[in-house]
Image: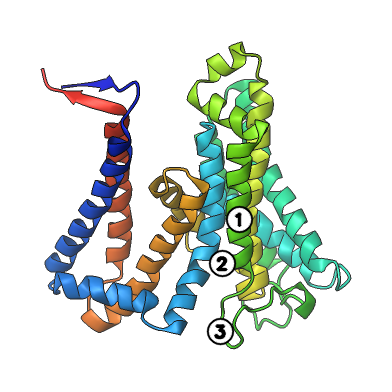
Amino acid sequence: MRLDPIAAPPLSRQIGLPALALVATLLAAMALALIAGADPLATLGLIAKGAFGSKFAALETLNRATPLIFTGLAVAVAFRAKLWNIGAEAQLYAGAIVAVLLGTGALGAPLVLPVSALAAMLAGALVLLGPVVLKTRLGVDEVVTTLLLNFVMLLFVSYLLEGPMKDPMGMGWPKSPALIKEARLPRIVDGLRLHWGFALALIAAVAVWVIQSRTTLGFEMRAVGQNREAARFAGMPVNVVLVKTALLSGGLAALAGWSEVAGLKGHLSSDLSPGFGYTGIIVAMLALLHPLGVVLSALFVAAIFVGSDSMSRAAGVPTYIADMLLATALLFMVLALMLTRYRVVWK
């Protein structure tokens, strides 16, 4: 068996294979439910009902999708330029730290929200800037450095929450002081948890799409991602493009942490993220790295997580089926992408 590249994949192949991957994912989900001893169709119905079956459930799905949109966009931007950012989790926590530092009374009320958001983006950008400089100057693999920075940042957060940023009124619990009211994102629907961070995530998706499809930077990012040496031969400043890509990617990931603190939690804790940075990779890949597709992909992933919690209680199926389902979806989508660009030839 060998793989022959396809010079110009037809549209039917580009759309049909990813669609087939989603169908295969649903079939795999039904098989997993059957193995767990539940009715496959009923299990899928319970997941859908748990995610969208009521106003509360639908808004919770949108709420869960908010950080996934930000981290998915961060990964999509970086991967488009072949910059393998595996450290969105670290950049997320950098944004969360800044949200607390500036949101507990350090700034005046009228400025605290926009200034803390911009400062959070800067912090996330700087976290990713280090690995990119190491890559462009010394050839250090960014997969390793960005991945390891996730653990460094988690340990740093633990230090802060047990030391300088520990809430003296927290009864010994490792969490930061609460944000002041002016530093909190208002709720979209009174009485429910959905906040305006979701609207900001949608704006960010549109902005990234405009950058990638309508600007010189977007063209340079695509060119560098397609063929770095050809882009350099054409006169593009490849290293500068990678640095700009890193700044944008890190800033987007940091907004996930900032929105979770400012919009949902109101304080920082070490369990702020259940892996939003890593899940962002799945979101971006399922969206085929398209910024607007990231929104739909994030909603799909959020629906699985929210719906699985409800399904588990109703059907007695472990919630781990959600992790299995997402892993299966990613594997099928990667296979579909490979078969879109390469033809299998049997010897």
Task: Identify the residue at image location x=66%, y=14%.
Answer: 235
Does label 3 or label 1 sit earlier along the sequence?
1
The residue identified by callout 3 is: 192
Q: Indicate the position of residue 126 as horizontal and vertical percent values.
A: 71, 43
Q: Which residue is mark 1?
A: 92
Q: Quadrant of residue 306?
A: bottom left
- SS at circle 2: loop
- Percent across and percent down for residue 46 are 27, 77
- Residue at mark 1 to residue at mark 2: CA–CA distance: 10 Å
Q: Earlier in the sequence, mark 3 or mark 2?
A: 3
How crowded pointer 3 is (Cα within 10 Å; few <14, some 14-19, many 20+) is rated as few
Distance of mark 3 from mark 1, alpha carbons? Answer: 24 Å
Residue 302 x, y percent position in the rendering: 42, 65
Foreground mark, 3 or 2?
3
**Residue 48: mark:** none
Q: Residue furthest bottom?
A: 191
Q: What residue appears at the point 12 percent right and 67 percent down from the top-left corner?
A: 34
